[in-house]
């Protein structure tokens, strides 16, 4: 059973917007349902004003696509929907069509854990128009959130500079699925563990934790509370020391550790959860070191994010384990990634591709036409540039990359530069082409990916922009298509005004 099915049991096929079903009905009535179409899922701006984004969520997206099947229950619900005339919204023959529907598209995608940039398709869906359209919303809900949180986690991990980071966010996550998906995505992005047990079980993420203030409050004294906890967990105790007075708490922790030492007890850590974390961690470290407890960890929590972690480190805080909750799992400073899913090509009846785009007043919102692939150039130092191109058209020998939002920004790549194409086949006519990597392999991939970025792109504040854009011929084709569509629009307007 897939993890999504383990979680939700029932079919997820209705996990989409109504308009996907009304369009599906329309395509079916028009005889367009089986026309071959190509959609791409991509985002326009990196989150958190960062220099890079970490792709995440693909495994869940693929699980979703593979389970797509309307149950009798789903069909009964769709059959119960009424239009304005109080007649059924969908006719029975369409519901019968849906009963037999299975996902038979080809899906190509950039592997999870990869670094990705604006306009690059993370997922490309090619197949019958009705199916490829239907899955827009669930693909976006899965990919937008997990990519956002994986990127936040990568930033936190970057700030922590090799220290352990644990995700503590469930209690303030956006609901149940928010907490689970965030735990998975945060692990993809680089955090080392979660406090969320169900996420640990479902996704095989290491689980970790300390204890709450209530544990201390439940005993006569703080020392009694520590002693009881220490007896229960002789090797796994991290005492929360700030319930009453933090440095007094540290002294109590040390006293209890000494008292229990003959029983084989070893204090794993203390946790600071309020106050000036720099001052308190420095003082706590002194007390622990003086007591011969140099390897007792100092864990910190309290509304931390990558900026506070960076600042605490710069101030010389002696914290070596970070518990990060709310800010991470809610992506507090940017709560959504604006990923979109756009139609880019549709086969005509004569078998030729019709490349399509969505016009916008804002250049960055005009979608890209064609059957897109992303070519990443690299050298011995790391990644050099990315080029989005139309796979269905021949490429020139000379590589010139044009920014999708500013055509005066161009980069040429010397002939012979090594490259790889990022979108790889995942599903062929709906069937898995290869096993997807497990989370450990995805994490390793992410680590290698980030290492290949120049540090000016990795830095958290005002990073340098990585060169990623459209192949020049592709850019030219897009420009011509935009001009042609605008002209067509203006001509239609003039004709109407003349009438
Ligand atoms: N030295 C520091 N430099 C920068 N930010 C810090 C520092 N110490 C703590 N912070 C952060 O400042 C914010 C507020 O800290 P504060 O001590 O006011 O916590 P608090 O939640 O108000 O305390 P309490 O839990 O006792 O009410 C938190 O996000 C915390 O992580
Ligand atoms: O601060 P976060 O990054 O979200 O990390 C999780 C927080 O959850 C717990 O707090 P609790 O629910 O007891 O509330 P409080 O400590 O803020 O009072 C814990 O002590 C952390 O402070
Ligand atoms: O284990 C902890 O210390 C923990 C878990 C969740 C939230 N805050 C802290």
Image (tube, helix red, strand yellow):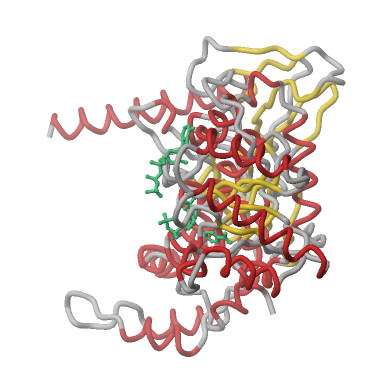
- Where is residue 378 drawn, in percent x and y? 80, 24
Asked which quadrant contains residue 280, the reply is top right
Seen from the viewer's position, the closer of residues 150 and 32 is 150
Location of ligand 1 given as a quarter of the image: top left
- Where is residue 286 drawn, in percent x and y? 66, 37
Asked which quadrant contains residue 16, the reply is bottom left
Left or right: 395, with 214 as reference point? right
- Where is residue 346 drawn, in percent x and y? 54, 48
Residue, far top: 408
Check the image and report above or below for 185 versus 499: below
Left or right: 126, with 140 as reference point? right
Asked which quadrant contains residue 151, the reply is top right
Can residue 401 be seen in the rendering of this structure?
yes
How many marks can you see?
0
- Residue at point 46%, 57% (across, down): 243
- Residue at point 28%, 82% (across, down): 88
- Where is residue 411 drawn, in percent x and y? 66, 13
Left or right: 226, with 110 as reference point? left
Can residue 130 be seen in the rendering of this structure?
no
Quarter of the image with the C terminus in it: top left
Quarter of the image with the N terminus in it: bottom right
Check the image and report above or below for 33 versus 75: above
Seen from the viewer's position, the closer of residues 430 and 301 is 301
């Amino acid at each position: 059973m897939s993890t999504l099915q383990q979680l939700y049991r029932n079919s997820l096929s209705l996990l989409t917007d109504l308009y996907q079903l009304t369009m599906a009905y329309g395509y079916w009535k028009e005889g367009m349902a089986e026309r071959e179409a190509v959609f791409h899922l991509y985002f326009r701006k990196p989150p958190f004003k960062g220099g890079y984004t970490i792709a995440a969520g693909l495994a869940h997206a693929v699980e979703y696509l593979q389970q797509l099947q309307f149950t009798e229950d789903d069909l009964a619900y769709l059959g119960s929907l009424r239009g304005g005339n109080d007649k059924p919204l969908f006719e029975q023959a369409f519901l019968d069509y849906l009963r037999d529907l299975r996902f038979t598209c080809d899906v190509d995608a950039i592997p999870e854990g990869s670094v990705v940039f604006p306009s690059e398709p993370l997922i490309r869906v090619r197949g019958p128009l009705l199916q490829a359209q239907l899955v827009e919303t669930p693909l976006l809900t899965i990919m937008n959130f997990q990519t956002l949180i994986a990127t936040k986690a990568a930033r936190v991990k970057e700030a922590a500079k090799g220290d352990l980071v644990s995700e503590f966010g469930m209690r303030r996550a956006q609901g149940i699925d928010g907490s689970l998906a965030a735990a998975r995505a945060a692990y993809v992005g680089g955090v080392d563990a979660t406090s969320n047990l169900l996420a640990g079980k479902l996704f095989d993420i290491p689980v970790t934790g300390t204890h709450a203030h209530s544990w201390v409050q439940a005993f006569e004294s703080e020392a009694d509370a520590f002693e009881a906890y220490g007896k229960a967990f002789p090797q796994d105790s991290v005492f929360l020391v700030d319930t009453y007075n933090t440095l007094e708490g540290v002294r109590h922790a040390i006293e209890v550790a000494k008292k229990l030492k003959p029983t084989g007890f070893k204090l794993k850590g203390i946790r600071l959860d309020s106050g000036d974390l720099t001052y308190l961690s420095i003082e706590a470290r002194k007390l622990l070191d003086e007591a011969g407890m140099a390897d007792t960890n100092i864990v910190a929590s309290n509304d931390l994010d990558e900026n506070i972690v960076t600042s605490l480190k710069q101030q010389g805080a002696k914290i070596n384990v970070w518990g990060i909750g709310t800010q991470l799992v809610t992506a507090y400073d940017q709560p959504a990634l604006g990923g979109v899913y756009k139609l880019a090509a549709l086969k005509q009846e004569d078998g030729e591709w019709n490349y399509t785009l969505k016009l916008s007043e804002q250049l960055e919102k005009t979608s890209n036409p064609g059957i897109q692939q992303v070519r990443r150039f690299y050298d011995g130092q790391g990644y050099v540039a990315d080029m989005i191109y139309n796979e269905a058209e021949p490429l020139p020998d000379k590589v010139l990359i044009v920014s999708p939002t500013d055509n005066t920004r161009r980069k040429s790549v010397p002939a012979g530069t090594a490259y790889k194409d990022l979108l790889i086949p995942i599903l062929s006519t709906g069937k898995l082409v290869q096993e997807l990597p497990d989370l450990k392999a995805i994490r390793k991939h992410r680590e290698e990916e980030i290492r290949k970025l120049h540090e000016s792109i990795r830095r958290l504040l005002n990073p340098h922009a990585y060169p990623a854009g459209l192949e020049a011929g592709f850019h030219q084709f897009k420009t011509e298509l935009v001009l042609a569509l605008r002209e067509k629009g203006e001509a239609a307007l003039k004709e109407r005004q003349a009438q």
